[in-house]
């Protein structure tokens, strides 16, 4: 059947390409013109389907290097778009102006098929090689096109549907193509209508983000036909200097004005033209607008346009400090830049972390039990998960148990499971315990130091005998156990005090991995960038950025809450900035004031009411009358305790709400309250 379809397609291409079919519709079709071009100019033979040509990594790297800055911007747009279309089976390619795929985002589960179809980094989609196709024909036609199934030239491509949009540099040069493809689709090409619009929209967004990157240090006039939308999606953008002369134009503006000036659409012929020659706006109105005064309505000066616009002016960024653009996290398979594993991504250039990662990676499959030690929020669970993903058991379950958060009365049944009817309140069918659920995978025992003594004894037996006995059962169940344990406590001290079994300690600590606190790490900048990019993506702020001034403050902070505090602070700042560059004003107060070390006591709270409060976002407050006055000595030097106190007060002493606000478990809140001597007012 498939062969018959391919044969019919080949016959059709030959008939059209050689001119044997002279139907008017056929002759006019963009694709049929391309078929003719493929046969007569590119010398392609439809009877000989061409296999996907994938360039070697070194060659791809060269293609990527030529457009490095643009790649970052495009990547952010692609990631955002991929989230919207991934579930519908689409993948995204970015090619350069030669049609070579320089970036790719696809579903890893279908990667082999995508690679076979040439939907992959390094593939050559130039029409001269691949025949009529989304990318190649878009490069020829320079407009968004959908090349749907049998519109492809090559018979091996007739299952694909590809929508491609050209991408231009601010100077009008063609940079490449954004392509959105699927391996299969409904037969009707109108099924791709929305994808066509989405691709056009994202291509424009990527171009505009690139334009803003290039002209961020200039004044930018945005013009839009809808008054309320001009701030967010000025269709036309013109960068201008202090003399009101145009220094750059986005694609929308070039398209609008190129005829006007009688210039070349792609040559950026607007440069050097006074804005007032193009628009019905006086220099004084323009500068008054730039100072934030009311926006007049403006019209193009040319009678044959007469289009009316609403303007808005964006000041140069350098006035508030230069802007650091964050590279997107390296999450996607790309031959040119080999992806880093989850384990490698945990750290940048910090020698202690690099060594830890290297050693842990080697040990994880060796049968040695790993004990992770580190302060709260330092990333113990993140490390355990990355180790699991790195191990040979990555496809098996990763089961995390927080020994401190499960109530003591339930921890036994949760860990070991129970048989039907073995205790009141249990499920009627019984329950498989967490240990058995981790069978063959990884059991992560967080806060192991908080495991009650009698359970330590039972657990030790599980470790020795590799079997669990659920509550109420008379026969043990065999399990393959791989344990990674973690603690913030000094377990040796706990052994001396008699609260932790020495034999269990030795059983669990085949190797002790000491995770450094953030303040001791030399890769804080790397973490800021990584976490910032992740949080920006989560909030769908594709072009989010961080000013140098804000970055300096983040690098100077001491991070008592470690990476968790950093994540919360960046999440908070991004939310406040609402997609604009994050400046010191959006940072939590203690970071913004650079006051983490000195801890002066401000007179009033600085965190805006109603917003989530991250660690580090608070200032110390005098205890209101009637509330607990925590022992002053214990709190005096401890920023962490003050933050906790503030959050508890803000959430009316609800442990659950405070734990959610701080992104920690309830047990951590209880533990920290105990540690800092914080007592709720109703318990005084
Ligand atoms: N290397 C890292 N890169 C990015 N984010 C990280 C990293 N390490 C930790 N985080 C983030 O910090 C937060 C805390 O991490 P995690 O829960 O692993 O810490 P923990 O040490 O187990 O804390 P606790 O002792 O309170 O359980 C999470 O939001 C996590 O995403």
Image (spheres, rainbow, N blue to C red):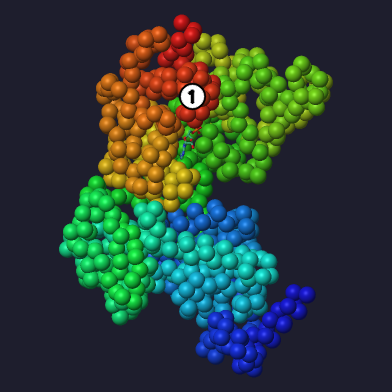
Q: Which residue is mark 1?
A: 658
- Taking depth in this image into account, of 389 and 674 the one nearest to the observer is 674
Picture quadrant of residue 109: bottom right
Horizontal relation, residue 448 to residue 636: left or right: right
* Residue 626 against residue 603 in the figure, above or below: above
| Quarter of the rendering containing residue 394 | top right
Say whether mark 1 is within 8 Å of ligand 1: no
Crowd band around label 1 with a 10 angstrom C-alpha radius: few (<14), some (14–19), many (20+): many
| Residue at 46% across, 57% down | 77
Image check: 555 left or right of 388?
Answer: left
Quarter occupied by residue 667: top right
Left/right of residue 459 with respect to residue 223 in the rendered view: right
Name the secondary structure under disc 1. Answer: helix
Up-down relation of residue 355 to residue 280 (above or below): above
Q: Nearer the viewer, residue 525 or 627?
A: 627
- At 61% across and 86% down in the image, what residue appears? 26
At horizontal 50% and vertical 59% (from top left) the residue drawn is 334
The percent position of residue 411, horizontal first and vertical second, equals: 65, 20
Quadrant of the drawing holding the N terminus: bottom right
Q: Residue lying furthest top in this view?
A: 684
Residue 90 in view here: yes
| Percent position of residue 319, x then y | 22, 49
Q: 151 or 183: nearer the eye?
A: 151
Name the residue nearer the viewer: 306 or 420: 306
User: Compared with residue 12, is residue 443 higher up or lower down, i.e. above or below?
Assistant: above
> Residue 545 placed where, x, y %?
36, 48
Residue 570 visible: no
On screen, residue 249 above or below 586: below
Q: Which percent across, then down, holds residue 320? A: 24, 46
């Amino acid at each position: 059947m498939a062969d018959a379809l391919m044969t019919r397609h080949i016959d059709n291409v030959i008939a059209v390409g050689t001119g044997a079919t002279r139907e008017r519709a056929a002759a006019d079709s963009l694709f049929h013109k391309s078929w003719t071009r493929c046969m007569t100019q590119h010398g392609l033979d439809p009877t000989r389907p061409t296999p996907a040509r994938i360039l070697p990594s070194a060659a791809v790297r060269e293609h990527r290097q030529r457009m490095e800055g643009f790649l970052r911007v495009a990547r952010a747009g692609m990631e955002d778009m991929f989230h919207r279309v991934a579930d519908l089976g689409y993948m995204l390619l970015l090619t350069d102006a030669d049609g070579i795929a320089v970036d790719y985002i696809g579903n890893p589960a279908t990667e082999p098929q995508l690679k076979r179809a040439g939907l992959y980094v390094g593939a050559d989609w130039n029409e001269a090689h691949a025949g009529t196709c989304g990318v190649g024909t878009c490069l020829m036609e320079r407009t968004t096109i959908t090349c749907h199934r049998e519109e492809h030239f090559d018979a091996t491509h007739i299952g694909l549907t590809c929508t491609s949009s050209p991408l231009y540099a601010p100077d009008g040069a063609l940079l490449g193509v954004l392509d959105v493809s699927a391996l299969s689709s409904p037969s009707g090409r109108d099924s791709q209508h929305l994808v066509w619009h989405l691709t056009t929209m994202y291509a424009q967004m990527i171009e505009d983000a690139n334009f803003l990157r290039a002209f961020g240090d200039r004044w930018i006039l945005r013009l839009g036909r809808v008054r309320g939308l001009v701030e967010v999606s000025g269709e036309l953008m013109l960068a201008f200097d202090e003399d009101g002369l145009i220094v750059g134009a986005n694609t929308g503006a070039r398209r609008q004005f190129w005829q006007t000036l009688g210039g070349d659409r792609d040559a950026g012929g607007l440069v050097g033209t006074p804005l007032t020659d193009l628009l019905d706006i006086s220099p004084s109105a323009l500068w008054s607008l730039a100072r934030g005064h009311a926006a007049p309505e403006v019209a193009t000066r040319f009678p044959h346009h007469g289009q009316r616009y609403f303007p808005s002016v964006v000041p140069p960024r350098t006035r508030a400090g230069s802007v650091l653009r964050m590279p997107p996290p390296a999450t996607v398979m790309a031959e040119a830049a080999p992806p880093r594993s989850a384990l490698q991504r945990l750290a940048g250039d910090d020698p202690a972390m690099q060594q830890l990662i290297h050693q842990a990676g080697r040990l994880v499959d060796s049968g040695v039990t790993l004990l992770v030690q580190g302060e709260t929020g330092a990333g113990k669970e993140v490390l355990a998960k990355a180790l699991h993903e790195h191990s040979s058991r990555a496809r098996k379950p990763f089961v995390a148990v927080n020994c401190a958060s499960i109530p003591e009365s339930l921890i036994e049944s949760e860990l070991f499971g129970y048989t039907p009817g073995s205790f009141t309140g249990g499920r009627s069918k019984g329950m498989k315990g967490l240990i058995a659920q981790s069978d063959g995978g990884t059991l992560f025992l967080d806060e192991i130091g908080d495991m009650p003594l009698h359970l330590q004894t039972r657990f030790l037996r599980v470790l020795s005998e590799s079997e669990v006995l659920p509550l109420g059962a008379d026969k043990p169940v065999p399990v393959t156990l791989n344990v990674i344990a973690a603690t913030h406590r000094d377990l040796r001290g706990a052994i001396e005090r008699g609260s932790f079994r020495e034999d269990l300690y030795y059983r669990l600590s085949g190797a002790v991995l000491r995770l450094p606190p953030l303040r001791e790490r030399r890769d804080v900048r790397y973490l800021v960038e990584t976490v910032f990019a992740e949080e920006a993506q989560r909030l769908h702020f594709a072009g989010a950025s961080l000013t140098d001034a804000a970055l300096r403050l983040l690098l100077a902070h001491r991070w008592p809450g470690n990476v968790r505090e950093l994540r919360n602070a960046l999440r908070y700042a991004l939310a406040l900035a609402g997609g604009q560059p994050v400046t010191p004003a959006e940072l939590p107060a203690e970071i913004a004031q650079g006051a983490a070390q000195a801890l002066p006591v401000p007179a009033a709270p600085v965190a805006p009411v109603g917003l989530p409060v991250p660690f580090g976002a608070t200032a110390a407050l005098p205890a209101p009358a009637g509330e607990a006055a925590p022992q002053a000595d214990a709190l005096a030097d401890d920023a962490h305790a003050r933050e906790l106190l503030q959050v508890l007060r803000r959430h009316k002493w609800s442990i659950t709400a405070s734990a959610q606000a701080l992104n920690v478990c309830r047990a951590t809140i209880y533990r920290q309250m105990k540690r800092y001597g914080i007592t709720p007012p109703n318990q005084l």
